[in-house]
Amino acid sequence: MKVKAAVLEQLNTPLIIEEIELDEPKDKEVLVKIAAIGMCHSDIHCIKGDLSVPLPIVLGHEAAGTVEKAGSSVTGLQPGDKVVVTVAPYCGQCPACMMGVPSSCEMDPQTAMLMGTLADGTKRLKRQNGDELNHFMAQSSFAEYAVVERSATVKVRDDAPLDVVCMLGCGASTGIGAVINKARVQAGKSVAVFGCGGVGLAAIMAAKLVGAHPIVAVDLLDSKLEMARELGATHLVNASQEDPVTKIAVDCEGGVDYSFESIGSTDVMTQAFHSVYPRPGGMAVVLGLAPIGATFSIEAWRFMRELVVTGCTVGSIKPQLDIPRYVNLFMEGKLPLDRLVSARYSLEQINEAVKDTLEGKVMRGVITF
Ligand SMILES: [Zn+2]
Ligand SMILES: [Zn+2]
């Protein structure tokens, strides 16, 4: 079928809107009519070349829409069902999946993410002239329709607004899951969140929901810090004006119980670790994606106090279980995800969305169809 899509032809050039050819879903796949998709920093990393993907490519990996057609062996989905399309398809059979961490699935779905194919290692996208186009994160949803693996789709309730819950496909689930699933922050524990974009703000609202206190927000922009305050931060640190490690030590009795790094900066990872009070149970959780090969250093003596530094991919969520829970929490007003959507764009305006995200003008820009 013919679909309109945004194609990245070369690094650091505007995306090109063109009509392309999308092949039918195979047995285990689903054709989704995209209703909304968030602009995530990983898409921007690809445009800038910080994340290496084969070109030309259709980016986009934080979508929601309705099921148009399901493959012959797909169960539990009907045409017309509303779905969030997650960034993390999984096999269900590898060691990571069987340990209950499908977001770190070790089989094909994950290796396909940056290789330009869908989860089964093949492609469904072509240009009108027959040239193949590459997929991104086994999804490619900067387009009117996308074919994705069944495991990447999560059915959500009919009354869920897709232009908000699409963020649960990647950024919002990353921030919420890091607090609720990975760190399991308890009421009264202190939290610092480094970076107040979509991921960091989602972490802050989750920290508020579980009763964390104090909640420190760290960013370089006062506008983002102000939003962090509105969503639950009790202390704000502008890291362009003061050292966050020192400030957190002063404000939080020597340091916080949990810190979350949502930027992907190795310098900030160091700060996040050093902001944790040296006490057993203290944990620094890294959510941001740093360039491949980048390293960071931390004071090793802190391990003598049994501190933990850990990664957390897509919030360590179990998509089929957690995304419907997060949708319910949003619908009940307990996770105000709608506050993260600060701009909406048409597909034709996608380059504006890229620019605004790059300049930090928006928390989350969402493209709607
Ligand atoms: Zn993302
Ligand atoms: Zn797996």
Image (spheres, rainbow, N blue to C red):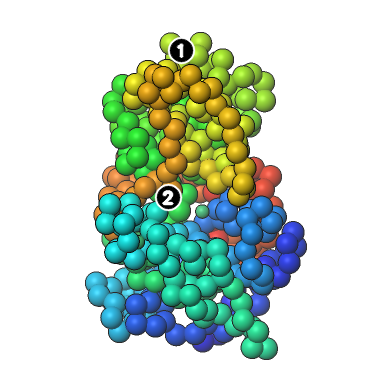
Element on which disc 1 rests: loop
Q: Please state the horizontal and vertical placement of residue 184, each as a whole percent of the image.
A: 31, 35
Is disc 2 surrounded by few (<14), some (14 to 19) or many (20+) residues within 10 Å?
many
Q: Mark 1 points at which residue?
A: 254
Q: Can you tell which mark lies on residue 314?
A: 2
Q: Quadrant of residue 214?
A: top left
Q: Quadrant of residue 219?
A: top right
Q: Which amino acid does label 2 sit on?
A: Val
| Residue at 41% over, 82% down | 25
In the rendered structure, are the residues bearing label 1 and label 2 in contact, judged by CB atoms less than 8 Å apart? no
Q: Please state the horizontal and vertical placement of residue 176, each as a whole percent of the image.
A: 38, 42
Q: Please state the horizontal and vertical placement of residue 88, each as a whole percent of the image.
A: 41, 59
**Foreground of the two, 9 or 324:** 9
Label 1 and label 2: CA atoms lie apart by 30 Å
Q: Can residue 314 be seen in this view?
A: yes
| Residue at 34% over, 21% down | 280
Q: Please state the horizontal and vertical placement of residue 250, each as a whole percent of the image.
A: 51, 11
